[in-house]
Protein backbone atom coordinates (compact mmCIF):
# COMPACT_ATOMS: atom_id res chain seq x y z
CA UNK A 1 0.00 0.00 0.00
CA UNK A 2 2.88 2.34 0.83
CA UNK A 3 4.55 1.58 -2.50
CA UNK A 4 1.38 2.46 -4.35
CA UNK A 5 1.15 5.81 -2.58
CA UNK A 6 4.75 6.70 -3.43
CA UNK A 7 4.20 5.70 -7.04
CA UNK A 8 1.07 7.80 -7.27
CA UNK A 9 2.94 10.77 -5.96
CA UNK A 10 5.76 10.27 -8.44
CA UNK A 11 3.45 9.91 -11.46
CA UNK A 12 1.18 12.95 -11.52
CA UNK A 13 -1.56 13.27 -14.11
CA UNK A 14 -1.07 15.26 -17.33
CA UNK A 15 -3.35 18.25 -17.09
CA UNK A 16 -4.12 20.35 -20.17
CA UNK A 17 -7.40 21.92 -19.16
CA UNK A 18 -8.00 25.66 -19.43
CA UNK A 19 -10.84 27.89 -18.34
CA UNK A 20 -12.57 27.67 -21.70
CA UNK A 21 -11.84 24.01 -22.31
CA UNK A 22 -12.98 21.25 -20.05
CA UNK A 23 -10.48 18.42 -20.40
CA UNK A 24 -10.03 15.72 -17.78
CA UNK A 25 -6.47 15.21 -16.57
CA UNK A 26 -4.68 12.22 -18.05
CA UNK A 27 -3.81 9.87 -15.23
CA UNK A 28 -0.56 7.98 -15.18
CA UNK A 29 -1.94 4.62 -16.37
CA UNK A 30 -3.81 6.29 -19.22
CA UNK A 31 -0.68 8.21 -20.22
CA UNK A 32 1.34 4.99 -20.13
CA UNK A 33 -1.20 3.30 -22.34
CA UNK A 34 -1.11 6.26 -24.74
CA UNK A 35 2.69 6.03 -24.90
CA UNK A 36 2.42 2.35 -25.69
CA UNK A 37 -0.08 3.12 -28.45
CA UNK A 38 2.21 5.81 -29.80
CA UNK A 39 5.10 3.37 -29.91
CA UNK A 40 3.00 0.73 -31.64
CA UNK A 41 1.55 3.12 -34.21
CA UNK A 42 4.91 4.65 -35.03
CA UNK A 43 6.74 1.36 -35.15
CA UNK A 44 7.30 0.99 -38.90
CA UNK A 45 7.47 4.43 -40.50
CA UNK A 46 7.23 6.68 -37.50
CA UNK A 47 4.06 8.25 -36.23
CA UNK A 48 1.94 9.49 -39.17
CA UNK A 49 0.99 13.12 -39.40
CA UNK A 50 -2.71 12.32 -39.55
CA UNK A 51 -3.94 9.71 -37.18
CA UNK A 52 -7.63 9.00 -36.64
CA UNK A 53 -9.53 7.16 -33.95
CA UNK A 54 -12.96 5.70 -34.53
CA UNK A 55 -15.16 2.96 -33.15
CA UNK A 56 -17.93 0.61 -34.15
CA UNK A 57 -20.64 2.19 -32.03
CA UNK A 58 -20.89 5.44 -30.11
CA UNK A 59 -19.91 5.61 -26.46
CA UNK A 60 -16.74 3.59 -26.93
CA UNK A 61 -14.53 6.38 -25.58
CA UNK A 62 -13.01 7.51 -28.88
CA UNK A 63 -12.99 11.15 -27.81
CA UNK A 64 -11.26 10.34 -24.55
CA UNK A 65 -8.71 8.04 -26.16
CA UNK A 66 -7.86 10.55 -28.90
CA UNK A 67 -7.60 13.38 -26.35
CA UNK A 68 -5.41 11.31 -24.04
CA UNK A 69 -3.24 10.26 -26.97
CA UNK A 70 -2.88 13.83 -28.23
CA UNK A 71 -2.15 15.25 -24.79
CA UNK A 72 0.45 12.59 -24.00
CA UNK A 73 2.06 12.93 -27.42
CA UNK A 74 2.32 16.70 -27.05
CA UNK A 75 3.61 16.41 -23.51
CA UNK A 76 6.24 13.79 -24.26
CA UNK A 77 7.54 14.82 -27.69
CA UNK A 78 7.06 18.60 -27.42
CA UNK A 79 5.84 18.49 -30.97
CA UNK A 80 2.85 20.52 -31.99
CA UNK A 81 -0.24 18.34 -31.85
CA UNK A 82 -3.69 19.32 -33.03
CA UNK A 83 -6.70 17.40 -31.81
CA UNK A 84 -9.32 17.75 -34.53
CA UNK A 85 -12.79 16.79 -33.45
CA UNK A 86 -14.79 15.59 -36.41
CA UNK A 87 -17.50 13.93 -34.43
CA UNK A 88 -20.47 16.18 -35.12
CA UNK A 89 -22.68 13.60 -33.46
CA UNK A 90 -21.12 14.41 -30.11
CA UNK A 91 -20.87 18.16 -30.38
CA UNK A 92 -21.20 21.22 -28.24
CA UNK A 93 -23.61 23.46 -30.12
CA UNK A 94 -22.55 26.55 -28.21
CA UNK A 95 -18.87 26.28 -29.08
CA UNK A 96 -17.61 27.42 -32.45
CA UNK A 97 -15.59 24.93 -34.38
CA UNK A 98 -14.54 23.48 -37.68
CA UNK A 99 -18.03 23.55 -39.18
CA UNK A 100 -18.16 27.30 -38.63
CA UNK A 101 -14.87 27.74 -40.48
CA UNK A 102 -15.87 25.56 -43.43
CA UNK A 103 -19.58 26.38 -43.71
CA UNK A 104 -19.93 29.82 -42.24
CA UNK A 105 -16.61 31.50 -43.01
CA UNK A 106 -15.30 31.86 -39.48
CA UNK A 107 -11.59 32.44 -39.00
CA UNK A 108 -9.51 29.49 -37.98
CA UNK A 109 -7.86 31.48 -35.20
CA UNK A 110 -11.29 31.98 -33.66
CA UNK A 111 -12.03 28.31 -33.27
CA UNK A 112 -8.68 26.86 -32.25
CA UNK A 113 -8.56 26.38 -28.49
CA UNK A 114 -5.19 26.55 -26.83
CA UNK A 115 -4.56 24.42 -23.80
CA UNK A 116 -2.28 24.75 -20.81
CA UNK A 117 0.21 22.72 -22.83
CA UNK A 118 1.56 25.05 -25.50
CA UNK A 119 2.15 22.10 -27.84
CA UNK A 120 -1.46 20.96 -27.79
CA UNK A 121 -4.40 22.67 -29.43
CA UNK A 122 -7.96 21.51 -29.83
CA UNK A 123 -10.06 22.25 -32.90
CA UNK A 124 -13.67 21.55 -31.90
CA UNK A 125 -16.18 20.19 -34.35
CA UNK A 126 -18.66 22.99 -34.02
CA UNK A 127 -22.34 22.58 -34.87
CA UNK A 128 -23.56 20.86 -38.02
CA UNK A 129 -27.00 19.48 -38.79
CA UNK A 130 -27.57 16.25 -40.66
CA UNK A 131 -27.28 17.74 -44.14
CA UNK A 132 -24.20 19.77 -43.23
CA UNK A 133 -22.47 16.70 -41.82
CA UNK A 134 -22.73 14.89 -45.14
CA UNK A 135 -21.33 17.94 -46.97
CA UNK A 136 -18.51 18.39 -44.47
CA UNK A 137 -17.46 14.78 -44.88
CA UNK A 138 -17.64 14.63 -48.65
CA UNK A 139 -17.09 17.91 -50.45
CA UNK A 140 -13.29 17.94 -50.11
CA UNK A 141 -13.06 21.21 -48.22
CA UNK A 142 -12.27 19.42 -45.03
CA UNK A 143 -9.28 17.74 -46.63
CA UNK A 144 -7.93 21.10 -47.76
CA UNK A 145 -8.47 22.50 -44.32
CA UNK A 146 -6.60 19.61 -42.79
CA UNK A 147 -3.75 20.28 -45.20
CA UNK A 148 -3.62 23.81 -43.86
CA UNK A 149 -3.59 22.51 -40.31
CA UNK A 150 -0.80 20.10 -41.17
CA UNK A 151 1.43 23.08 -41.84
CA UNK A 152 0.79 24.33 -38.33
CA UNK A 153 0.95 21.05 -36.44
CA UNK A 154 3.32 18.10 -36.54
CA UNK A 155 0.53 15.66 -35.84
CA UNK A 156 -3.22 15.84 -36.32
CA UNK A 157 -5.25 13.53 -34.18
CA UNK A 158 -8.72 13.08 -35.66
CA UNK A 159 -11.68 12.12 -33.52
CA UNK A 160 -14.12 10.38 -35.87
CA UNK A 161 -17.75 9.35 -35.33
CA UNK A 162 -18.72 5.71 -34.89
CA UNK A 163 -18.69 3.63 -38.05
CA UNK A 164 -22.04 1.95 -37.46
CA UNK A 165 -23.58 5.30 -36.54
CA UNK A 166 -22.99 7.01 -39.86
CA UNK A 167 -21.40 6.31 -43.21
CA UNK A 168 -19.62 9.67 -42.88
CA UNK A 169 -16.98 8.03 -40.72
CA UNK A 170 -16.01 5.72 -43.60
CA UNK A 171 -15.54 8.76 -45.82
CA UNK A 172 -13.70 10.68 -43.10
CA UNK A 173 -11.40 7.70 -42.56
CA UNK A 174 -10.06 8.28 -46.07
CA UNK A 175 -8.63 11.60 -44.88
CA UNK A 176 -6.17 9.97 -42.51
CA UNK A 177 -2.82 8.26 -42.81
CA UNK A 178 -3.53 5.77 -40.06
CA UNK A 179 -6.69 4.61 -38.42
CA UNK A 180 -7.18 2.95 -35.07
CA UNK A 181 -10.42 1.26 -34.05
CA UNK A 182 -11.38 1.75 -30.42
CA UNK A 183 -13.27 -1.17 -28.88
CA UNK A 184 -14.70 -0.81 -25.43
CA UNK A 185 -14.00 -3.82 -23.29
CA UNK A 186 -17.11 -5.71 -22.26
CA UNK A 187 -19.50 -3.48 -24.25
CA UNK A 188 -18.87 -3.77 -27.98
CA UNK A 189 -19.81 -7.09 -29.48
CA UNK A 190 -17.63 -9.11 -31.81
CA UNK A 191 -20.27 -8.78 -34.52
CA UNK A 192 -20.21 -4.98 -34.28
CA UNK A 193 -16.42 -4.89 -34.45
CA UNK A 194 -16.39 -7.24 -37.43
CA UNK A 195 -19.01 -5.15 -39.21
CA UNK A 196 -17.05 -1.95 -38.56
CA UNK A 197 -13.86 -3.57 -39.87
CA UNK A 198 -15.74 -4.78 -42.92
CA UNK A 199 -17.10 -1.30 -43.64
CA UNK A 200 -13.79 0.49 -43.11
CA UNK A 201 -11.73 -2.12 -44.90
CA UNK A 202 -9.28 -4.28 -43.06
CA UNK A 203 -6.25 -2.88 -44.87
CA UNK A 204 -7.05 0.66 -43.77
CA UNK A 205 -7.04 -0.11 -40.08
CA UNK A 206 -3.69 0.00 -38.31
CA UNK A 207 -4.97 -1.88 -35.33
CA UNK A 208 -7.40 -2.12 -32.48
CA UNK A 209 -7.31 -0.36 -29.13
CA UNK A 210 -9.11 -1.98 -26.24
CA UNK A 211 -10.58 0.79 -24.15
CA UNK A 212 -11.47 0.58 -20.48
CA UNK A 213 -9.94 -2.84 -20.29
CA UNK A 214 -10.44 -4.16 -16.85
CA UNK A 215 -10.25 -7.76 -15.83
CA UNK A 216 -12.79 -8.64 -13.21
CA UNK A 217 -10.88 -11.77 -12.31
CA UNK A 218 -9.14 -11.25 -8.97
CA UNK A 219 -5.40 -10.79 -9.30
CA UNK A 220 -4.61 -13.82 -7.17
CA UNK A 221 -6.59 -16.08 -9.50
CA UNK A 222 -5.01 -14.53 -12.58
CA UNK A 223 -1.58 -15.17 -11.13
CA UNK A 224 -2.40 -18.74 -10.17
CA UNK A 225 -3.78 -19.56 -13.60
CA UNK A 226 -1.14 -17.57 -15.42
CA UNK A 227 -3.76 -15.44 -17.18
CA UNK B 1 -11.12 -26.10 -21.97
CA UNK B 2 -9.27 -23.52 -23.96
CA UNK B 3 -7.61 -20.58 -22.30
CA UNK B 4 -9.97 -18.13 -24.00
CA UNK B 5 -13.03 -20.03 -22.83
CA UNK B 6 -11.68 -20.17 -19.28
CA UNK B 7 -11.00 -16.43 -19.28
CA UNK B 8 -14.46 -15.75 -20.64
CA UNK B 9 -16.13 -17.91 -18.01
CA UNK B 10 -14.13 -16.31 -15.21
CA UNK B 11 -14.75 -12.80 -16.53
CA UNK B 12 -18.45 -13.54 -16.75
CA UNK B 13 -18.57 -14.94 -13.24
CA UNK B 14 -16.58 -12.19 -11.57
CA UNK B 15 -18.58 -9.56 -13.46
CA UNK B 16 -21.62 -10.31 -11.31
CA UNK B 17 -20.51 -12.91 -8.78
CA UNK B 18 -23.49 -12.44 -6.49
CA UNK B 19 -25.90 -13.05 -9.35
CA UNK B 20 -24.21 -16.27 -10.39
CA UNK B 21 -23.92 -17.48 -6.80
CA UNK B 22 -27.69 -17.38 -6.41
CA UNK B 23 -28.12 -21.08 -7.34
CA UNK B 24 -25.50 -22.02 -4.76
CA UNK B 25 -27.12 -19.81 -2.12
CA UNK B 26 -30.52 -21.33 -2.90
CA UNK B 27 -29.06 -24.83 -2.67
CA UNK B 28 -27.42 -24.06 0.66
CA UNK B 29 -30.66 -22.55 1.92
CA UNK B 30 -32.57 -25.61 0.79
CA UNK B 31 -29.99 -27.84 2.49
CA UNK B 32 -30.37 -25.92 5.76
CA UNK B 33 -34.17 -26.11 5.55
CA UNK B 34 -34.04 -29.80 4.68
CA UNK B 35 -31.72 -30.61 7.57
CA UNK B 36 -33.78 -28.53 9.99
CA UNK B 37 -37.05 -30.08 8.88
CA UNK B 38 -35.77 -33.63 8.84
CA UNK B 39 -37.76 -35.76 11.26
CA UNK B 40 -36.19 -37.44 14.25
CA UNK B 41 -35.50 -41.00 13.28
CA UNK B 42 -35.45 -44.02 15.49
CA UNK B 43 -33.23 -46.89 14.60
CA UNK B 44 -33.64 -50.48 15.68
CA UNK B 45 -31.47 -53.30 14.51
CA UNK B 46 -30.36 -56.84 15.12
CA UNK B 47 -27.29 -58.80 14.21
CA UNK B 48 -27.45 -62.33 12.80
CA UNK B 49 -24.51 -64.67 12.51
CA UNK B 50 -24.16 -66.56 9.24
CA UNK B 51 -20.88 -68.29 9.87
CA UNK B 52 -22.20 -71.86 10.01
CA UNK B 53 -21.37 -73.85 6.94
CA UNK B 54 -24.72 -75.54 6.80
CA UNK B 55 -26.48 -72.34 7.65
CA UNK B 56 -24.43 -70.52 5.10
CA UNK B 57 -25.48 -72.89 2.39
CA UNK B 58 -29.09 -72.50 3.44
CA UNK B 59 -29.05 -68.81 3.98
CA UNK B 60 -27.00 -67.65 1.09
CA UNK B 61 -26.81 -70.42 -1.41
CA UNK B 62 -23.05 -70.46 -0.92
CA UNK B 63 -21.70 -73.87 -0.23
CA UNK B 64 -18.35 -74.91 1.05
CA UNK B 65 -17.65 -76.45 -2.29
CA UNK B 66 -18.54 -73.33 -4.15
CA UNK B 67 -15.86 -71.82 -6.36
CA UNK B 68 -13.58 -69.17 -4.91
CA UNK B 69 -15.35 -65.88 -4.46
CA UNK B 70 -14.43 -62.55 -2.98
CA UNK B 71 -17.86 -62.24 -1.44
CA UNK B 72 -18.12 -63.03 2.23
CA UNK B 73 -21.08 -65.01 3.60
CA UNK B 74 -22.27 -61.86 5.35
CA UNK B 75 -22.01 -59.90 2.11
CA UNK B 76 -23.97 -62.47 0.15
CA UNK B 77 -26.62 -62.76 2.86
CA UNK B 78 -27.10 -59.01 3.27
CA UNK B 79 -27.35 -58.61 -0.48
CA UNK B 80 -29.96 -61.33 -0.62
CA UNK B 81 -32.00 -59.69 2.13
CA UNK B 82 -31.88 -56.36 0.31
CA UNK B 83 -32.83 -58.09 -2.94
CA UNK B 84 -35.73 -59.82 -1.24
CA UNK B 85 -36.92 -56.50 0.18
CA UNK B 86 -37.17 -55.34 -3.42
CA UNK B 87 -39.78 -58.00 -4.09
CA UNK B 88 -43.39 -57.19 -3.34
CA UNK B 89 -44.01 -60.56 -1.69
CA UNK B 90 -41.23 -60.38 0.85
CA UNK B 91 -41.78 -56.68 1.58
CA UNK B 92 -45.46 -57.36 2.18
CA UNK B 93 -44.59 -60.32 4.42
CA UNK B 94 -42.31 -58.09 6.48
CA UNK B 95 -45.00 -55.41 6.72
CA UNK B 96 -47.53 -58.05 7.69
CA UNK B 97 -45.23 -59.53 10.34
CA UNK B 98 -44.66 -56.03 11.67
CA UNK B 99 -48.40 -55.43 11.93
CA UNK B 100 -48.41 -52.71 9.31
CA UNK B 101 -51.08 -54.18 7.04
CA UNK B 102 -53.70 -51.67 8.17
CA UNK B 103 -51.26 -48.84 7.60
CA UNK B 104 -50.55 -50.23 4.15
CA UNK B 105 -54.24 -50.57 3.32
CA UNK B 106 -55.02 -47.05 4.46
CA UNK B 107 -52.08 -45.62 2.54
CA UNK B 108 -50.27 -44.26 5.61
CA UNK B 109 -47.25 -46.23 4.54
CA UNK B 110 -46.25 -47.82 1.26
CA UNK B 111 -44.17 -50.85 0.43
CA UNK B 112 -41.56 -48.56 -1.10
CA UNK B 113 -41.23 -46.80 2.24
CA UNK B 114 -40.89 -50.14 3.98
CA UNK B 115 -38.11 -51.04 1.54
CA UNK B 116 -36.23 -47.81 2.17
CA UNK B 117 -36.68 -48.06 5.92
CA UNK B 118 -35.10 -51.50 6.23
CA UNK B 119 -31.55 -52.27 5.23
CA UNK B 120 -29.20 -55.16 5.69
CA UNK B 121 -25.45 -54.67 5.75
CA UNK B 122 -22.54 -56.99 6.39
CA UNK B 123 -20.59 -56.51 9.57
CA UNK B 124 -17.34 -58.32 9.03
CA UNK B 125 -17.32 -61.67 7.25
CA UNK B 126 -20.00 -63.54 9.10
CA UNK B 127 -22.35 -61.04 10.71
CA UNK B 128 -25.27 -59.31 9.11
CA UNK B 129 -26.82 -56.22 10.61
CA UNK B 130 -30.48 -55.67 9.84
CA UNK B 131 -31.63 -52.19 10.66
CA UNK B 132 -35.00 -50.46 10.48
CA UNK B 133 -35.19 -46.68 10.68
CA UNK B 134 -38.51 -44.89 10.99
CA UNK B 135 -39.97 -41.90 12.77
CA UNK B 136 -41.74 -44.26 15.20
CA UNK B 137 -39.56 -46.26 17.62
CA UNK B 138 -42.19 -49.02 17.90
CA UNK B 139 -42.43 -49.36 14.13
CA UNK B 140 -38.63 -49.52 13.83
CA UNK B 141 -38.48 -52.27 16.41
CA UNK B 142 -41.26 -54.28 14.79
CA UNK B 143 -39.86 -53.88 11.30
CA UNK B 144 -36.39 -55.04 12.35
CA UNK B 145 -37.83 -58.08 14.11
CA UNK B 146 -40.21 -58.82 11.26
CA UNK B 147 -37.43 -58.67 8.68
CA UNK B 148 -35.21 -61.07 10.61
CA UNK B 149 -38.08 -63.47 11.29
CA UNK B 150 -39.41 -63.30 7.73
CA UNK B 151 -36.01 -63.92 6.28
CA UNK B 152 -35.30 -66.91 8.51
CA UNK B 153 -38.78 -68.32 7.84
CA UNK B 154 -38.20 -67.92 4.15
CA UNK B 155 -34.89 -69.76 4.36
CA UNK B 156 -36.41 -72.53 6.47
CA UNK B 157 -39.39 -72.81 4.14
CA UNK B 158 -37.05 -73.07 1.17
CA UNK B 159 -35.02 -75.79 2.92
CA UNK B 160 -37.95 -77.99 4.03
CA UNK B 161 -40.01 -77.44 0.92
CA UNK B 162 -38.90 -80.69 -0.73
CA UNK B 163 -39.46 -82.78 2.37
CA UNK B 164 -42.82 -81.14 2.97
CA UNK B 165 -43.87 -81.83 -0.60
CA UNK B 166 -42.80 -85.47 -0.24
CA UNK B 167 -44.74 -85.81 2.99
CA UNK B 168 -47.86 -84.36 1.42
CA UNK B 169 -47.45 -86.68 -1.57
CA UNK B 170 -47.22 -89.80 0.60
CA UNK B 171 -50.07 -88.63 2.82
CA UNK B 172 -52.24 -88.29 -0.27
CA UNK B 173 -51.08 -91.70 -1.42
CA UNK B 174 -51.80 -93.22 2.00
CA UNK B 175 -55.32 -91.85 1.80
CA UNK B 176 -55.86 -93.74 -1.46
CA UNK B 177 -54.28 -96.86 -0.03
CA UNK B 178 -56.49 -96.64 3.02
CA UNK B 179 -59.56 -96.59 0.82
CA UNK B 180 -58.25 -99.63 -1.01
CA UNK B 181 -57.54 -101.34 2.30
CA UNK B 182 -61.01 -100.57 3.58
CA UNK B 183 -62.51 -101.95 0.38
CA UNK B 184 -60.43 -105.13 0.64
CA UNK B 185 -61.45 -105.60 4.27
CA UNK B 186 -65.09 -105.03 3.41
CA UNK B 187 -64.90 -107.52 0.56
CA UNK B 188 -63.40 -110.11 2.89
CA UNK B 189 -65.96 -109.48 5.64
CA UNK B 190 -68.83 -109.55 3.20
CA UNK B 191 -67.67 -112.79 1.66
CA UNK B 192 -67.26 -114.42 5.06
CA UNK B 193 -70.71 -113.18 6.11
CA UNK B 194 -72.31 -114.46 2.95
CA UNK B 195 -70.51 -117.76 3.06
CA UNK B 196 -70.65 -119.08 6.59
CA UNK B 197 -68.25 -121.75 7.51
CA UNK B 198 -69.96 -125.26 7.37
CA UNK B 199 -70.69 -126.90 10.69
CA UNK B 200 -69.15 -130.15 9.58
CA UNK B 201 -66.25 -130.49 7.30
CA UNK B 202 -64.23 -127.94 5.46
CA UNK B 203 -65.30 -125.16 3.04
CA UNK B 204 -65.50 -126.02 -0.54
CA UNK B 205 -62.31 -125.60 -2.40
CA UNK B 206 -63.60 -122.56 -4.43
CA UNK B 207 -64.55 -120.74 -1.21
CA UNK B 208 -61.16 -121.47 0.25
CA UNK B 209 -59.54 -120.11 -2.87
CA UNK B 210 -61.66 -116.95 -2.74
CA UNK B 211 -60.91 -116.38 0.94
CA UNK B 212 -57.23 -116.84 0.22
CA UNK B 213 -57.44 -114.27 -2.63
CA UNK B 214 -59.33 -111.77 -0.49
CA UNK B 215 -56.90 -112.20 2.39
CA UNK B 216 -53.95 -111.66 0.07
CA UNK B 217 -55.61 -108.53 -1.39
CA UNK B 218 -56.24 -107.17 2.07
CA UNK B 219 -52.65 -107.90 3.06
CA UNK B 220 -51.32 -106.19 -0.01
CA UNK B 221 -53.45 -103.11 0.64
CA UNK B 222 -52.33 -103.13 4.23
CA UNK B 223 -48.69 -103.22 3.18
CA UNK B 224 -49.19 -100.37 0.70
CA UNK B 225 -50.96 -98.25 3.26
CA UNK B 226 -48.34 -98.90 5.95
CA UNK B 227 -45.54 -98.22 3.50
CA UNK B 228 -47.04 -94.89 2.42
CA UNK B 229 -47.58 -93.87 6.02
CA UNK B 230 -43.99 -94.76 6.85
CA UNK B 231 -42.65 -92.74 3.96
CA UNK B 232 -44.82 -89.75 4.83
CA UNK B 233 -43.57 -89.95 8.35
CA UNK B 234 -39.99 -90.16 7.12
CA UNK B 235 -40.49 -87.03 5.00
CA UNK B 236 -42.03 -85.18 7.93
CA UNK B 237 -39.13 -86.24 10.08
CA UNK B 238 -36.62 -84.95 7.51
CA UNK B 239 -38.48 -81.63 7.29
CA UNK B 240 -38.60 -81.29 11.01
CA UNK B 241 -34.98 -82.26 11.30
CA UNK B 242 -34.02 -79.61 8.75
CA UNK B 243 -36.10 -77.03 10.54
CA UNK B 244 -34.57 -77.90 13.87
CA UNK B 245 -31.14 -77.92 12.30
CA UNK B 246 -31.56 -74.40 10.94
CA UNK B 247 -33.24 -73.21 14.13
CA UNK B 248 -30.31 -74.51 16.12
CA UNK B 249 -27.77 -73.00 13.79
CA UNK B 250 -29.34 -69.55 13.51
CA UNK B 251 -27.37 -67.45 15.88
CA UNK B 252 -29.09 -64.21 16.63
CA UNK B 253 -26.19 -62.32 18.11
CA UNK B 254 -28.11 -59.14 18.93
CA UNK B 255 -31.88 -59.11 18.95
CA UNK B 256 -33.53 -55.83 17.93
CA UNK B 257 -34.49 -53.56 20.79
CA UNK B 258 -36.96 -50.75 20.89
CA UNK B 259 -35.03 -47.46 20.67
CA UNK B 260 -35.69 -44.88 23.34
CA UNK B 261 -34.06 -41.87 21.74
CA UNK B 262 -33.82 -40.56 18.20
CA UNK B 263 -30.45 -40.75 16.57
CA UNK B 264 -29.21 -37.87 14.46
CA UNK B 265 -28.37 -39.30 11.05
CA UNK B 266 -25.17 -37.37 10.44
CA UNK B 267 -24.36 -39.34 7.33
CA UNK B 268 -27.70 -38.55 5.79
CA UNK B 269 -27.38 -34.88 6.75
CA UNK B 270 -23.90 -34.62 5.29
CA UNK B 271 -24.99 -36.40 2.12
CA UNK B 272 -28.00 -34.12 1.78
CA UNK B 273 -25.86 -31.01 2.19
CA UNK B 274 -23.18 -32.31 -0.17
CA UNK B 275 -25.75 -33.28 -2.79
CA UNK B 276 -27.52 -29.94 -2.68
CA UNK B 277 -24.26 -27.99 -2.67
CA UNK B 278 -23.11 -30.00 -5.68
CA UNK B 279 -26.38 -29.25 -7.45
CA UNK B 280 -25.92 -25.59 -6.56
CA UNK B 281 -22.39 -25.56 -7.95
CA UNK B 282 -23.58 -27.21 -11.13
CA UNK B 283 -26.24 -24.52 -11.32
CA UNK B 284 -23.59 -21.82 -10.91
CA UNK B 285 -21.43 -23.31 -13.67
CA UNK B 286 -24.45 -23.75 -15.95
CA UNK B 287 -25.61 -20.18 -15.35
CA UNK B 288 -22.14 -18.77 -15.96
CA UNK B 289 -21.73 -20.89 -19.10
CA UNK B 290 -25.13 -19.76 -20.35
CA UNK B 291 -24.35 -16.11 -19.67
CA UNK B 292 -20.92 -16.45 -21.30
CA UNK B 293 -22.47 -18.10 -24.34
CA UNK B 294 -24.95 -15.26 -24.77
CA UNK B 295 -22.42 -12.54 -23.99
CA UNK B 296 -21.07 -11.50 -27.39
CA UNK B 297 -19.05 -8.57 -26.08
CA UNK B 298 -15.30 -8.32 -26.49
CA UNK B 299 -13.69 -9.34 -23.23
CA UNK B 300 -10.17 -10.38 -24.01
CA UNK B 301 -7.42 -9.66 -26.47
CA UNK B 302 -6.88 -13.25 -27.41
CA UNK B 303 -10.49 -13.67 -28.45
CA UNK B 304 -10.38 -10.48 -30.52
CA UNK B 305 -7.10 -11.42 -32.19
CA UNK B 306 -8.44 -14.87 -32.93
CA UNK B 307 -11.45 -13.47 -34.77
CA UNK B 308 -9.85 -10.51 -36.55
CA UNK B 309 -6.67 -10.42 -38.56
CA UNK B 310 -5.75 -7.11 -36.96
CA UNK B 311 -3.11 -6.37 -34.35
CA UNK B 312 -4.09 -5.19 -30.91
CA UNK B 313 -2.20 -1.92 -30.60
CA UNK B 314 -2.74 -1.71 -26.90
CA UNK B 315 -5.30 -1.25 -24.22
CA UNK B 316 -6.40 1.75 -22.25
CA UNK B 317 -7.18 0.83 -18.68
CA UNK B 318 -10.27 2.09 -16.96
CA UNK B 319 -9.58 5.52 -15.50
CA UNK B 320 -10.37 5.02 -11.83
CA UNK B 321 -9.46 8.58 -10.96
CA UNK B 322 -11.91 9.79 -13.59
CA UNK B 323 -14.54 7.52 -12.12
CA UNK B 324 -13.94 9.06 -8.73
CA UNK B 325 -14.13 12.53 -10.26
CA UNK B 326 -17.45 11.67 -11.88
CA UNK B 327 -19.81 14.55 -11.76
CA UNK B 328 -23.14 14.49 -9.94
CA UNK B 329 -26.01 12.91 -11.84
CA UNK B 330 -27.71 16.27 -12.26
CA UNK B 331 -24.78 17.53 -14.35
CA UNK B 332 -24.19 14.46 -16.47
CA UNK B 333 -26.40 15.50 -19.36
CA UNK B 334 -24.34 18.58 -20.04
CA UNK B 335 -22.12 18.26 -23.07
CA UNK B 336 -18.46 17.74 -22.48
CA UNK B 337 -16.04 19.40 -24.82
CA UNK B 338 -14.11 16.23 -25.49
Image: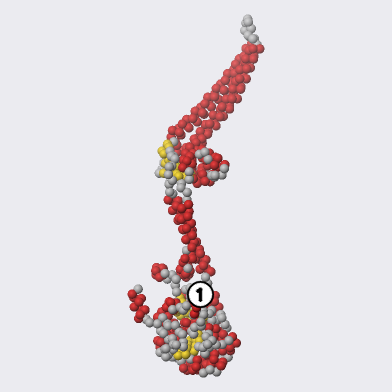
Q: Which residue is mark 1?
A: A187
Count of all numbered marks drawn on residues in the image? 1
Lateral position of residue A180 relative to residue B206, left or right: left
For the view shown, which residue lies furthest in the front direction?
B330
In the image, B65 versus A56, the foreground residue is: A56
Lateral position of residue B259 relative to residue B209, left or right: left
In the image, B278 versus A42, the foreground residue is: B278
- Whether residue A48 is visible: no
> Image point 43% across, 70% down: which residue?
A217
- Whether residue A132 is visible: yes
Percent position (x, y) of residue B114? 51, 44
For the view shown, which residue lies furthest in the right direction?
B194
Is B230 above or below relative to B300?
above
Percent position (x, y) of residue B326? 45, 78
- Colour convention: secondary structure
> Image point 45% across, 84% down: which residue?
A23
In the image, A40 versus A21, the foreground residue is: A21
> Image point 52% across, 90% down: which residue?
A96
Is B234 above or below relative to B328?
above
Percent position (x, y) of residue B106? 57, 43
Category of crowding for the residue at label 1, using alpha-carbon neighbours closer than 10 angstroms: few (below 14), some (14–19), many (at least 20): some
Label 1: state its secondary structure. Answer: loop
Is B256 above or below relative to A141?
above
Percent position (x, y) of residue B68? 43, 44
Judging from the image, mark 1 belongs to the subunit labelled A
> Image point 54% across, 30% down: which residue?
B166
Amino acid sequence: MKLRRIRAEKDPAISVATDELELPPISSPIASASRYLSAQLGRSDGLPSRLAFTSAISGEGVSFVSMAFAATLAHDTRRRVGLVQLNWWNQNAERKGLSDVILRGAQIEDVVLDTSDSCLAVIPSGYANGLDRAILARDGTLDKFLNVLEDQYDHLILDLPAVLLTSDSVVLADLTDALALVVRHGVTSYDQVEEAVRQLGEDRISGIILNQEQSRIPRIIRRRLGL
Amino acid sequence: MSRNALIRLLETFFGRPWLYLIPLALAIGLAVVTVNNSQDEFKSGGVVSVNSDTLLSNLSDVSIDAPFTFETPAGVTSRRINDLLGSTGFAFTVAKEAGLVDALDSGIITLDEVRTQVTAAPVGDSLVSITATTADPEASFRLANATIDSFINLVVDDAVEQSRTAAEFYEDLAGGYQTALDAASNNFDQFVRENDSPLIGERPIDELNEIERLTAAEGFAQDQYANALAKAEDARLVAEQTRLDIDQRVNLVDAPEQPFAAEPDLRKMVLTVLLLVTVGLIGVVALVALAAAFDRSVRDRAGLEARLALPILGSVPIDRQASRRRRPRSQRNEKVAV
